[in-house]
Image (cartoon, rainbow, N blue to C red):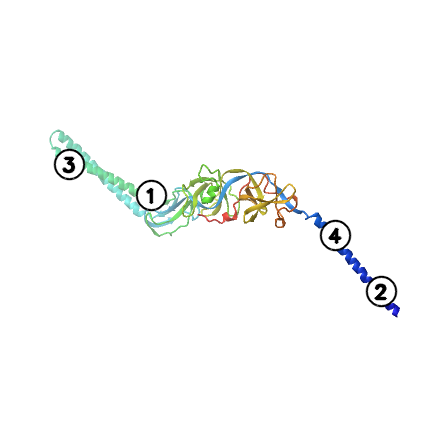
Amino acid sequence: MSQVHTNTRRFDLNKKILLAVMAACTLASCGKGEQQAAQAGPQALPVSVVELQPASVPVSAEAVAQTEGAREVEIRPRVGGILLKRLYEEGSSVKEGQVLFQIDPEPYQIALEQAKGQLAQAQAKIAQTQREAGRLKGLLESNSISQREYDNATSDNDVAKASLVQAQASVREAELNLSYTKVTAPVGGVSGRFQFSEGALVSANSSLLTTVVQLSPIWVRFSLSDNEIQQLGGPVTEKTVKKISLKLPDGSEYGETGKLNFASSQIDPALGTQQLRATFANADKKLLPGQFVRAKVVVGERDGVFLVPQVAVMNSQQGRFVYVLDESNHATVRPVVTGDWMGRDWVILKGLNAGEKVVVDNLIKIRPGAPLQPHPAAGPQDAATGKVEPQKSAANTSRKLA
């Protein structure tokens, strides 16, 4: 029994010794591996890069804009009276000269008949005075009457002529007033809501019956800030603008390009903006007055800039910067001067050169001078060479219409 106990104690002791030797070997092996890793240096971080090529971008600016009818006409009656009929469908298209309303014509028909009667009397009167003047002229030549009697007859004839002219004017006025009982559309366009009802009494030149808005062409009103004007190279004029396009509320591009038809000659001191207006064809009536859209003004092109994905551009207290690979594939901080957004890219105006490679991912893990393992960024890049259409930054899209 004592021999068995002794053997057990020896076995436990040997087991402890073996475990201690194994632990020591493991520690020695780990220490050697760490020493080798420290001697080898930090591992290169895999990153995606894009190689820069010069691009041409439009020199442009965008602003919130609002559409308005090229001609917005208020329809008011030229004569007063009882409104008998509405002769159009509200909201429908009307043609120039189309009759929209009928005012009671009876009082004006009576006035015309009275004016015609006065004209007939004036015509009879002048015929009588002319005959009398002719008769007295013969008597004057034979010395049968005095010069004074003849002059009085001539004066009566002149008065009759004046009465005739006045009667003719009264007839013309009565005819016009009668014609004005039919209220017509002065321009073609889309009619508005009827403001009265049949049987209402309307006043001449004051009662607003409805409106007619000309939709084609249509105007777009917008403004650019003083800072945006300087970015475009100076105040916007018809000579400097190359193209004006619209972006609709759903984000789609309007199919027609516009033409600047008004540019303010001064900066609004209250808003610090230049007021602008453009005209667009609108034959299909896709645009309606009062819509909010985005107007983009292009004044030229800027060559030799670079397009870098937005995610690659970082901010610091000193400004914006990107990470660029040097000849040994180490990260280098490069300060840049940015322009506007182009889709998903920043326009880089200064700080980069053609052929350089810009890092576009794992940016948080990168430190200046760190070794990198570059590979081309997957998928198509907006930084490819070519002409692209600009998209303003979110800060500009929130600017209200002046």
Residue 63 rendering spot, x and y as whole percentages: 48, 45
Q: Amino acid at mark 4?
A: Lys
Q: Amino acid at mark 2?
A: Arg
Cα separation between marks 4 and 2? 33 Å
Q: Which residue is mark 1?
A: 179
Cα separation between marks 3 and 2? 169 Å
Q: Which residue is mark 3?
A: 152
Mark 1 against mark 4, which lies toward the viewer? 4
Question: Which SS class for mark 1?
Answer: helix
For label 2, count other residues whose C-alpha is less than 10 Å away and answer few (under 14), some (14-19) or many (20+). few
Cα separation between marks 3 and 1? 41 Å
Please say if the residues under marks 3 and 1 sit with CB atoms less than 8 Å apart. Answer: no
Q: Amino acid at mark 3?
A: Asn
Q: Which mark is residue 32?
A: 4
Q: Amino acid at mark 1?
A: Ser
The residue most toward the bottom is 1
The correct choice, above or below, for 28 with respect to 233 in the image is below
Of marks 4 and 3, which one's residue comes earlier in the chain?
Answer: 4
Q: Which residue is mark 2?
A: 10
